[in-house]
Image (cartoon, helix red, strand yellow):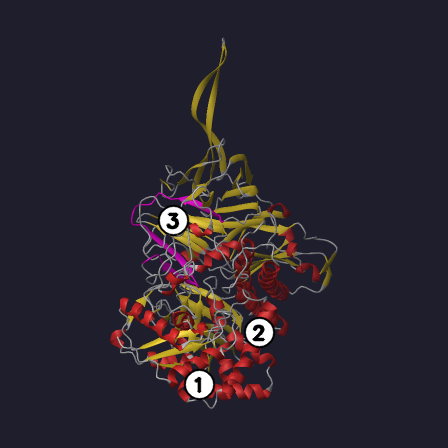
Amino acid sequence: MKIKEILVLHHSHMDIGYTHSQPVLWNLQREFIDQVLDMLEETSQWPKLSQPKWTIEVTAQILHWLKTADEKSIETLKAYVAQERIGLSGLQFNTTPLCNLEQLISQLRPIRGIEQALDYSIKTVIQHDVNGIAWPIVDLLHDNGIKALIMGINPHLGRAAASRPSFFHWEGPSKKKILVVNGEHYTMFDQQLKTAENSIETMKTGLDRYLTHLEGINYQQDFLYLTSSNVPVCWDNSPPNMQVARLIREWNDNDCGPVIRYVTPNELLKRVQQIPESELCTMKGDWTDFWNFGSASSAYETALNQKTKSMLFSAELIGANKIDPKPAIRENLDQSWKSLNIYDEHTWGCDESMDVDSYNTRSQWSFKAIKAYEAREHAFYPLIASLEDISENPGQAEGLEGVLLCNLTSKEQNVPVMLSKKWQTEGKQLRTARFRNDMQLINTKEEELIEFASVSIPAFGWRRIPLDQLEEPVQDSRISHGKYVKKSTQAIISFDTIRRIDDYIEYIESPFHRIEFDPKSGRILSLFDKRLAREILDIQNDWTFFQMVREYPDPLIDGRRESYYDRDIVKLLDDESCWSSSWACRREGAESFVSYEIEQKSTKITLVLRFKMDGMTNMEQRIVLHPHIPDIDLSVSFNKEECTDPESYYLVFPLALKSGWKGIFNTADTQVSLDDEQLPGACRDWVTAQSFVAMQDDDIAVSLCTPDAPMAMFGDFNFSKESTVIPRDKNPLLLSWPLNNYWNTNFRASQAGFIQLNYSLIIENSEEEYNYAKRAERSSVPLLSHPLINCSKAESGVFFTVTDSENIQVSSVTAMPENGGYRFRLINTSSETSEPTLTIPDFTVGSAYSANIFDERITDIPFTNNEVHTTIAPKEIQTICIKRKKG
């Protein structure tokens, strides 16, 4: 191996927060680009080989700068862009797997506007710091003109995928490929060559050491790619570094070794494209992230942000039916997407977040947390406004006549009608009042609802019902509860008195399941599936169904965060692991059982269990069975106490599965098979699930729907194991991982306060190709209920229909900006080509075409009247633009 040149990408790694408060940071990032223009002007007469260049790492930086830049500065920047002294990358943020498909698309959509403003073609996407990115990004980049993904993983509390530095083709779910530059952690030019010491000799020594490392891993290329910021003062959010530019010029002027030259991302791409295809392997699978376990350090806000995604989906779908959407609605939707993405961006808090009392910790968390609330409220307004539009409610009236129910899932639902007690059927009715949270089912407590008999609502459809036609609920005899004697003993009360003492087992039951529990301990003893005629739980396991477990480092051995991860900068230079897979920890269930009760209503039966749990107060679990659906609804609520010592909380499901079971989860609207569909080195020990995690063997499939708490583990408690593959032992655990504070920077050290988390468990026969996301829709896209001022008769209908609905997933439905058209984003989740038909009632199609994410036409799609007939390849994402016929 002989290195001929070293390519340096100079940038400011953007953490939204961490080093500075978010408002200050945004202003500094704007200043950095101004300073770059000055630096490039100052060095314009340098030898071309050594002239510094700058990369704008994420589009959020340039978008913010363009808001206030004057015309002269913009023209200067455009000139440097044309000279390839400034380069740009295409994603808006360094992001996390919390993002769904539409969020990733929303972060790519600014590309076209930036390209037009700067006369530049963006060909790459950079992701620094983060430990992975959702698999469907491959298809999105491929289909929208991006040629390469440049990764710079920070191995702190994580790990790089595959060996690095390396270059490979990444194959996406639909078999399309992009080029990957699997680079070192950002700032490694500065760290490896020790540029902060401002010495050419030190640079030589550092380079020699690094080259020895590369020989040890059999690096084959004749060039190196490294990045530079402004260490040791600013590793993140750094200004341009003139000192390193002078060092590089001195190095080149004195012929000190391999040529060092600055590159932009597009120039790096050109160099990597020169690597012979025979030297590039192809890898397939999800780049599953390590870092995102930190999102469980703010369980309440993370759950809130997760719920907002379904609210946005609903608001846009219903709002798409309006021919002339109001600009204010679009403005709110755009703001919601932006806030949603900033919350899901990888920076949670400041670098001193373990000091919970510091001003920096408090202020930066406040700015972070507010994004979850902003996203929710900016989605809530257009949702209710859209419901008001299709309800045709006047702004002020007397009395209510009916209710509008909307089912925005792909399956017909037969559900009890639930109305808020806040609805006043008589007296003054104001539009303003209908925008109150307590007027909706969203976030409304069960005791604040009134139940009526069940009705059916079509898939992607609605139903209007006069209030006087709502029927009182009838007790469903298919749900019940009872008890039986497990054993009897005799107790001697006195010399002549013996009393029989019976130990009872109690149960709740539906047509689908029977759940037995011990009324003395609250332990679930059995979950029996009647349809499959088998026990679902590993009843011999120490843990039981839906049990809360607290995990923490053993304080008698080493109670510090360093017990499981002891960071060593020297080891990290060569990607050596700092994880301790043999860390000593304790795991404990509840301290004691407090009480239980069984609540039976007309269409459900609920087992309520209350426990005393270390670190929590008022812990309550609810297990709900229904007579009409097999879903087992679960919820847990508690007040979390202040605790800054490292700890995790899990909800455990011990399953009676055969060895060799499969694990499945979804990310960005794509189903992923554990191990089989993950990149080498990507995280196995835990995953971020968009809406479900599932385990199946040859006989049964068990899926846990996770609308609130996205972190999960398969098989066992896996934290810090750094597994390359998850063992498939008999009787595995499925774990939700809703809370932890295991990080030692950035994420929250404590999260005191009230938290409620909801789940659903679904058990079915095992199938080879099973669409779990469809089963999770009921949990992830809740039913909507809205007051109707005028409702003289019952009606029902659909917003649209789509054939092959078992395989076609509707990712989004939005209004086209002109002529009252629609934009559908469909995904073929199957391994076979699908030919679905979209039908839109009361709509005449004028044109239909497939498009990229910028709505630019790709191919025309055939249509007749109100039907559009398309073809979607296996696993493909397709955007369909449909315009209304004029006249």
Do the residues bearing badges 3 and 1 touch, measured as CB atoms within 8 Å?
Answer: no
Give neighbour class at mark 1: few <14, some 14-19, many 20+ (Cα, 10 Å).
many
Quarter of the image where the C terminus is located: bottom right
- The circle drawn on residue 764 is 3
Where does the image place residue 588, in percent across and percent down from the top left? 46, 40
Amino acid at dot 2 = Leu
Mark 2 and mark 1 lie on one chain; the one further toward the N terminus is 2
Give neighbour class at mark 3: few <14, some 14-19, many 20+ (Cα, 10 Å).
some
- What residue range appears in magenta? 646-675
Amino acid at dot 1 = Gln
Do the residues bearing badges 2 and 3 touch, measured as CB atoms within 8 Å?
Answer: no
Q: Is residue 441 depicted above or below 831 in this figure?
A: above
Q: Closer to the camera, 671 or 386?
A: 671
Q: Quadrant of residue 298?
A: bottom right
* SS category of the residue bearing label 1: loop
Q: Quadrant of residue 258?
A: bottom left
Amino acid at dot 3 = Glu
Q: Is residue 144 visible?
A: no
Nearest-to-viewer mark from 2 and 1 = 1
Q: Closer to the camera, 299 or 826?
A: 299
Q: Is residue 834 visible?
A: yes
In the image, taking residue 159 as reference, residue 454 lies left or right, namely right
Q: Closer to the camera, 34 or 292?
A: 34
Where does the image place residue 164, in percent across and percent down from the top left? 33, 68
Residue 871 sits inside the magenta stretch: no
Give neighbour class at mark 2: few <14, some 14-19, many 20+ (Cα, 10 Å).
some
Residue at label 1? 51
Nearest-to-viewer mark from 2 and 3 = 2
Q: CA distance from mark 2 to mark 3?
A: 54 Å
Mark 2 and mark 3 lie on one chain; the one further toward the N terminus is 2
* SS category of the residue bearing label 3: strand
